[in-house]
Image: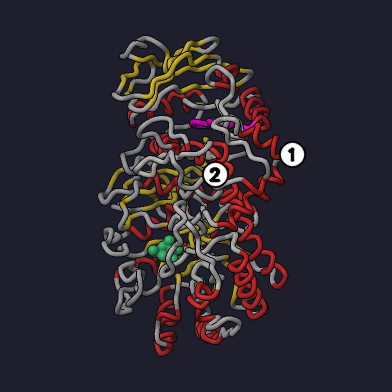
C-alpha cells in the first residue's frame, strides 16, 4: 500500500535530503510524489533539459527504500515560455491572466500544447527505465484557480471545430439551440462566439447572459479540452512506459467532468483538505468528496494530498487535533482510498504556501503529527487486507451529473438554490443514518435506492435505463426541476415533471420559487425555503403536503408504484430534520438497514465488518460492539475522541 508524502527536493538544500529521506523512512513513508511544479528546473531555457536534481533526489530516496510518483510539471510554465509564447488564458472580459502563480495557461493553446508535449516526452524518455518511479501523475488539479474556461481566440476556433463535429450542419445547430431568439443564427461554425462578457451581464457579473445552449456546450467543450490535454500527455507516456498514470483531482470540483477525466487514467487520486483557510468541512462533506472520487471511475483511489497540518495561504485553519490525522486517514480508507500521500513532508520556508503546514514544521523536527502518522502507517500495514481492493456494501446511490451541475449553474432556478448543495443534502441525510452511499452516475441496478436530485437535463437515451431500473424493482427518488430539459438545454414542451411525469404518477401543475419558508407535514414534517412544486397526484400517493401559502393542503412529496419498483417525487427542498425523515422513510420502504448512532459517529458497512469513525473530540458510546480487527480484542462500543474501529460483524470478511 502506498503510504507517502508530497515532497519538493528543490525547496531544500541538497545537504538536507539525506536526513529528510531518513526521517521519511523512520515515519514509515514508502513513497513520495514530486516534480509536478518543477518545469523551470527541468528545462531552464527552451530546449535545455536537465533532470540531474531530480535524478539525485530519486537516488537518495531509493537508498531509503522510498519510491516515487512523478508529476509532469505542466501546471507551472516557466517565465521564458510565457515571454516567448502567448500561452496565457483570457478571462471572459478579454483580460489576459497574469503569470506569477500557476495554472494560467490555456489547454487549447498550440504553443502550450507543443511545449508540454516536449517536456513530457523528455521526462518519459529519461525515467522510463527507472525502477524507483512507480507511477506518473499528469499535471496537477486541472481547473484549479478558476482555470477551466478560457476565452481566447484559440479556444473560440477550437470550439467552432468541436461544434462542427457534433452537429450535422450550422442550421441544425441553430435550430437545436433556438438561435432564432434575438437574431442569433450563425452562418458558419467559424462564426460561433464564446459566452464572454456582453450587454446583458449584470453589474455583479453573476448573470449568465447568453443562450443557455451556447453556455452549456461551452462548458462541455472546456471540460473536454482538459480531458484532451491530459490524453495528449497520457499518449506520450504510454509510448514509453506501462506504469500506472493518474491525475490529482479535486473532490467536489464540478467544472471538469471527473468521469471523463478519469476514464483515461489507471487510477484516480485527489487532494483532501478538510479544514483550511477557506473553511472547516462537515465530515459528511468530506465523505461525499471521497465518494465522488471513488465514483468517478467506480474504483478505489489514492489520496495524493492529505492535509497533515494547519493550512492556509495567509490565514490558517485549525491545527489537526490529536488523533485527527489518523481519523482522516481511516475516513478516506472507509470510502475507498487504498493509498495515502500526505501534503507535504516539511513546511515550506518560502513561496505562496509558507503557512500550508505539512507533516514536519518549518524546522524539520518530527513532532506530534509525525509520530501520529508513523503509528497510523504501522496500523495500516496490518490492516492492508481490509484496504487494498476492499469494497463497501453500498445501499444507495446519489447520481451526480456534470451536465446538470453546469445547467443548474447557468440557470439557477431560485435564489439560494445550488445543485451541489441539493445533492449534498441527500448524501448527508443518508450518511447521518449510516446508510453506505455511493456517488456516481451509472449501474443503477446495483443499488436499492437511486437518488437523482434535480435531474433537470435528461438525454432521451438515458430514459430507458432509468425506467427499467424502476420496472425491475428499484426505488428512484426525483426532485423538483427534474426531467424538464433536453441535452441542448432546451425546455421540453411537456407538463412538469417532463419526461418523468408517467413514472412519477403526478403532474406538478404549478411551482413557487420561495421568498419565505413553507411548512410541510404528513409522513414527513419539515420546512421548505427554496422551492415548492404544487403537485396533483395521478396514480401516486401523497406522503406529505404543504401547510401554508395558497397551495395549503396540496401534495409536496409523493410515492408511486411503477412496475415492480417505486418512484418518489420530492417537490420541495427540506431542512435537515425533514430530509432525514424522508430518507428514513424511503430507506425503510426499500429494506435498507438504518443504524442510529450518536451525532458525529459514522459507520460504513462492509462484508463481515463495519468501520466506525468518531468525528467528535469526545469519547462516545457508538452502540457497535464486536471483535476489533485493529487490536484483535473485544470492542465494547466506546470510541475515544476522533477514534476509529474496524468491528467484526459476523458473516464473510
Ligand atoms: C493543492 C495543490 C497543492 C498545494 C495545496 C495547498 O490544491 O495541489 O499543490 O497547492 O493545494 O495549497
The one of 502 and 447 positioned closer to us in this rendering: 502
Residue 264 visible in this rendered orientation of the protein: yes
Label 1: state its secondary structure.
loop
Give the percent coordinates (x, y) of residue 633.
40, 54
Give the percent coordinates (x, y) of residue 358.
36, 69
* Marks 1 and 2 close (CB-CB < 8 Å): no
Q: Which residue corresponds to the image point at 56% horizontal and 30% vertical from the top-left?
A: 181
Left or right of 168 on screen, residue 208 = left
- The label nearer to you, 1 versus 2, is 1
Q: Residue furthest bottom?
A: 15
Q: Which tag, 1 or 2, sits closer to the chain's start?
A: 1
Picture layout, residue 376 above or below residue 498: below
Label 2: state its secondary structure.
loop
The one of 354 and 201 positioned closer to us in this rendering: 201
Residue 64 part of the magenta-drawn span: no
Left or right of 42 on screen, residue 345 = left
Picture layout, residue 7 above or below residue 384: below
User: Quarter for ligand 1?
Assistant: bottom left
The colour scheme applied to this rendered structure is secondary structure
Q: Which residue corresponds to the image point at 64% horizontal and 32% vertical from the top-left?
A: 176
> Alpha-carbon neighbours of circle 1 within 10 Å: few (<14), some, or many (≥20)?
few
Residue 455 part of the magenta-drawn span: yes
Picture layout, residue 365 above or below residue 231: below
- The region drawn magenta spans 450-459
Residue 543 visible in this rendered orientation of the protein: no
Tag 2 residue: 607
Q: Which quarter of the figure is the N terminus placed in?
A: bottom right
Picture layout, residue 110 above or below residue 393: below
Tag 1 residue: 168
Amino acid at each position: 500500500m502506498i503510504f507517502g508524502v508530497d515532497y519538493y527536493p528543490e525547496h531544500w538544500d541538497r545537504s538536507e535530503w539525506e536526513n529528510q529521506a531518513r526521517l521519511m523512512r523512520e515515519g514509515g513513508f514508502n513513497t513520495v510524489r514530486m516534480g509536478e511544479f518543477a518545469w523551470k528546473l527541468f528545462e531552464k531555457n527552451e530546449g535545455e533539459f536537465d533532470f540531474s536534481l531530480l535524478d539525485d533526489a530519486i537516488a537518495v530516496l531509493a537508498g531509503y527504500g522510498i519510491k516515487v510518483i512523478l508529476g509532469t510539471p505542466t501546471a507551472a510554465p516557466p517565465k521564458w515560455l510565457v515571454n516567448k509564447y502567448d500561452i496565457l488564458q483570457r478571462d471572459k472580459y478579454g483580460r489576459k491572466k497574469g503569470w506569477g502563480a500557476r495554472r494560467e495557461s490555456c489547454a487549447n493553446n498550440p504553443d502550450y500544447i507543443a511545449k508540454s508535449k516536449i517536456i513530457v516526452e523528455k521526462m518519459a524518455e529519461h525515467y522510463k527505465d527507472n525502477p524507483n518511479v512507480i507511477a506518473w501523475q499528469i499535471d496537477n488539479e486541472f481547473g484549479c484557480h478558476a482555470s477551466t474556461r478560457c476565452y481566447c481566440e484559440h479556444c473560440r476556433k477550437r470550439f467552432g471545430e468541436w461544434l462542427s463535429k457534433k452537429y450535422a450542419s450550422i442550421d441544425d445547430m441553430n435550430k437545436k439551440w433556438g438561435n432564432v431568439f434575438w437574431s442569433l443564427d450563425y452562418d458558419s461554425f467559424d462564426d460561433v462566439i464564446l459566452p464572454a462578457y456582453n450587454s446583458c451581464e449584470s453589474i455583479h457579473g453573476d448573470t449568465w447572459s447568453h443562450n443557455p445552449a451556447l453556455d452549456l456546450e461551452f462548458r462541455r467543450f472546456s471540460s473536454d479540452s482538459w480531458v484532451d490535454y491530459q490524453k495528449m500527455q497520457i499518449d506520450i507516456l504510454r509510448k514509453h512506459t506501462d506504469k500506472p498514470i493518474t491525475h490529482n483531482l479535486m473532490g467536489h470540483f464540478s467544472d471538469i467532468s471527473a468521469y471523463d477525466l478519469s476514464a483515461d487514467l489507471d487510477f484516480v487520486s485527489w487532494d483532501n483538505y478538510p479544514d483550511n483557510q477557506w473553511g472547516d468541512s462537515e465530515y459528511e462533506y468530506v465523505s461525499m468528496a471521497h465518494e465522488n472520487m471513488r465514483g468517478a471511475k467506480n474504483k478505489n483511489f489514492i489520496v495524493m494530498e492529505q492535509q497533515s497540518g494547519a493550512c492556509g495561504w495567509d490565514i490558517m485553519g485549525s491545527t489537526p487535533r490529536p488523533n485527527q490525522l489518523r481519523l482522516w486517514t481511516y475516513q478516506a480508507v472507509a470510502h475507498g482510498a487504498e493509498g495515502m500521500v500526505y501534503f507535504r513532508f516539511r513546511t515550506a520556508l518560502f513561496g505562496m504556501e509558507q503557512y500550508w503546514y505539512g507533516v514536519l514544521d518549518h524546522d524539520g523536527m518530527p513532532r506530534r503529527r509525525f509520530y501520529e502518522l508513523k503509528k497510523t502507517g504501522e496500523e495500516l500495514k496490518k490492516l492492508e487486507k481490509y484496504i487494498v481492493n476492499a469494497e463497501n456494501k453500498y445501499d444507495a446511490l446519489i447520481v451526480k451529473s456534470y451536465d446538470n451541475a453546469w445547467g443548474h449553474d447557468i440557470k439557477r432556478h431560485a435564489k439560494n438554490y445550488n445543485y451541489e448543495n441539493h445533492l449534498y443534502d441527500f448524501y448527508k441525510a443518508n450518511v447521518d443514518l449510516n446508510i453506505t452511499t455511493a456517488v456516481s452516475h451509472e449501474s443503477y441496478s446495483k443499488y436499492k435506492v437511486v437518488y437523482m436530485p434535480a435531474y433537470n437535463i435528461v438525454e432521451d437515451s438515458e430514459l430507458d435505463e432509468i425506467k427499467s431500473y424502476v420496472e425491475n424493482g428499484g426505488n428512484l427518488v426525483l426532485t423538483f426541476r427534474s426531467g424538464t430539459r433536453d441535452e441542448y438545454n432546451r425546455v421540453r414542451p411537456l407538463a412538469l415533471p417532463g419526461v418523468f411525469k408517467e413514472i412519477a404518477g403526478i403532474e406538478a401543475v404549478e411551482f413557487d420559487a420561495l421568498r419565505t419558508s413553507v411548512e410541510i407535514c404528513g409522513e414527513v414534517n419539515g420546512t421548505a425555503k427554496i422551492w415548492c412544486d404544487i403537485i396533483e397526484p395521478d396514480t401516486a400517493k401523497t406522503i406529505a403536503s404543504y401547510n401554508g401559502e395558497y397551495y395549503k393542503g396540496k401534495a409536496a412529496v409523493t410515492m408511486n408504484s411503477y412496475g415492480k419498483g417505486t418512484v418518489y417525487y420530492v417537490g420541495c427542498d427540506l431542512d435537515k430534520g425533514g430530509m432525514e425523515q424522508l430518507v428514513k422513510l424511503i430507506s425503510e420502504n426499500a429494506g435498507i438497514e438504518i443504524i442510529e448512532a450518536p451525532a458525529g459517529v459514522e459507520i460504513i458497512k462492509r462484508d463481515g465488518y463495519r468501520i466506525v469513525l468518531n468525528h467528535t473530540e469526545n469519547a462516545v458510546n457508538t452502540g457497535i460492539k464486536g471483535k476489533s480487527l485493529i487490536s484483535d480484542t473485544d470492542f465494547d462500543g466506546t470510541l475515544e475522541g476522533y477514534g476509529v474501529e474496524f468491528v467484526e460483524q459476523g458473516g464473510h470478511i
